[in-house]
Structures are given as structure tokens and as C-alpha cells.
């Protein structure tokens, strides 16, 4: 299934962001030709707390952009580089794909196994997992810059843990940030032997509690 970001943050003076049917599109380049360097970035935050088999796909090309590599990970927020990085806390970042050897005449397609990349960095998915696309240089488009299109994140729901919040109103995934609003939905979705986390405890649910499979029920304040 397609996983949509819970938030999108633009950083820098030269970011153009479009939400197209085939996925997010990003243009990053210094908007002026004053030779002053600028960092341009787009950070996408996702709730990946109950997802597995996650893949990040996109296409990218450059416009005479000089390569700038980050230091070995983890590196701090605010690092200038050309690439794609991930963070579980927004503080420590790890590059998972460089954008320093792109073609200028055509787009290069990328399909990244995010589970493997995250595991290699010693991280784990959570409800505020961040993916950043970053470009750093000192000239406008055609003389510098990186174009990215078709940014798409897909994955499969991991039903070992399911969340319930009777007061929640919105799109329901059973995740911590997008929980089910009824126990019935949770018990149907959760894996046998899995865990149902109820925000506020069972007393908050205005429905009969019918357990039809072995599960662990946890009250979360």
C-alpha cells in the first residue's frame, strides 16, 4: 500500500515542491547566481510504526550540480550534502542514497529497500520516521540543482501491534498516530498472539469487549 507522509518540511530558499498523481516532485537549486552556497532540502515524516517491507522509489537527475558528500553517519541535522538520508529522531541522520553521480540528460530510477537500509544504520521504524532529500550548491537551475520526481513510499502493515483510541476521528490504520476507534476493528486486524494498545485503557471504550483470538491487551496512559 502507498504510505503518505504525516508532514512535509521545506528547508532552504530554493525548493519547489509539487504533489503530482505519480508522486511528490521536488526541484532543489540555489535561486540566485550570487555564488553564495545554499542548502535546500525536503523532509518527509511518516508513521512507519506498524509497517514492514517498506520501499522508497523515486527518479532523479542533476543540472551540473557539483557533488557534496556528508560525513560518515550519524551526522547532525543541518548537514550540507547531496543525497537522501533517514532519521528516527530528527537529530542523528544516516545517508541511504547519494545523489552525486546523476545524469543531466535523463532521470535515473531508484528503488530502495528501506527495511534493509534502516537496519544497516542500526535504526528502527517509528511513528515519526523522517526521510530527507537534500541538495547543496551555489547556482540556479541549469547551472546547478537536482530534480526529483515520483517520490513514493510503499509497505505492508505489520499487525503484531495495533492501536485503539475511542476518541480518535480520522483515517484509521491501527497505528499509534492513526489508530482504530473501536476494539472490534483492532481484534479483527491484529495478528494472533499480537498486542492491542488501548489509549486510556479499556474503560474508555463504549462497546462490549469480545476477544476472539489470543492477544495481549495493554493500557497506554
Image: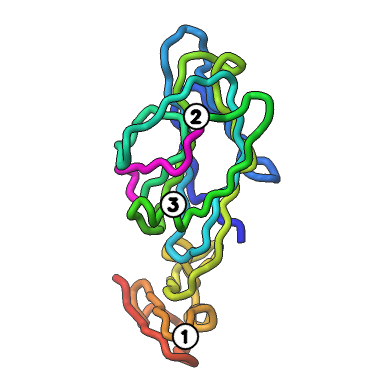
Tell me, yes or no, if residue 37 can be seen here: yes
Residue furthest to the top: 34
Residue 192 circle label: 1
Q: Is disc 2 in contact with disc 1, using a CB cutoff of under 8 Å?
A: no
Q: Residues within 10 Å of mark 1 (few under 14, many from 20)?
A: some
The numbered mark, 2 or 3, whose residue comes first in the sequence reads 2
Q: Residue at x 68, y 30 (%)?
A: 106
- Report the residue marked by disc 2: 100
Q: What secondary structure is marked by label 1?
A: loop
Q: Is residue 139 above or below residue 57?
A: above
Q: Is residue 23 above or below residue 214?
A: above
Q: Position of residue 15 (x, y in %)?
A: 53, 27
The answer to which of 187 and 209 lies nearer the viewer is 187
Q: Residues within 10 Å of mark 3 (few under 14, many from 20)?
A: some
**Placement of the N terminus among the 4 image quadrants:** bottom right
- Report the residue marked by disc 3: 117
Residue range of the region highlighted in magenta in the rendering: 88-99
The answer to which of 82 and 18 lies nearer the viewer is 82
Q: Does the stretch in magenta take in 164?
A: no
Q: Position of residue 214 (x, y in %)?
A: 43, 90
Amino acid at each position: 500500500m502507498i504510505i503518505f507522509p504525516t508532514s512535509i518540511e521545506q528547508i532552504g530558499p530554493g525548493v519547489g515542491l509539487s504533489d503530482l498523481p505519480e508522486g511528490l516532485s521536488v526541484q532543489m537549486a540555489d535561486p540566485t547566481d550570487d555564488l553564495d552556497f545554499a542548502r535546500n532540502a525536503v523532509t518527509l515524516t511518516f508513521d512507519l510504526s506498524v509497517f514492514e517491507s517498506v520501499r522508497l522509489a523515486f527518479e532523479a537527475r542533476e543540472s551540473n550540480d557539483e557533488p557534496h558528500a556528508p560525513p560518515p553517519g550519524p551526522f547532525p541535522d543541518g548537514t550540507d550534502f547531496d543525497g537522501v538520508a533517514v532519521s528516527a529522531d530528527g537529530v542523528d541522520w544516516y545517508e541511504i542514497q547519494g545523489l552525486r553521480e546523476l545524469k543531466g540528460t535523463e532521470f535515473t530510477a531508484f528503488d530502495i529497500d528501506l527495511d534493509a537500509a534502516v537496519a544497516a544504520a542500526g535504526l528502527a521504524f517509528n511513528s515519526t520516521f523522517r526521510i530527507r532529500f537534500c541538495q547543496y550548491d551555489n547556482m540556479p537551475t541549469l547551472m546547478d540543482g537536482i530534480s526529483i520526481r515520483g517520490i513514493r513510499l510503499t509497505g505492508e502493515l505489520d499487525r503484531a501491534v495495533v492501536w485503539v483510541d475511542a476518541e480518535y476521528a480520522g483515517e484509521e490504520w491501527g497505528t499509534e498516530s492513526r489508530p482504530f476507534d473501536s476494539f472490534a476493528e483492532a481484534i479483527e486486524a491484529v495478528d494472533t498472539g499480537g498486542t492491542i494498545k488501548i489509549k486510556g485503557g479499556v474503560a474508555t471504550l463504549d462497546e462490549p469487549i469480545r476477544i476472539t483470538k489470543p492477544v495481549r491487551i495493554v493500557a497506554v496512559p
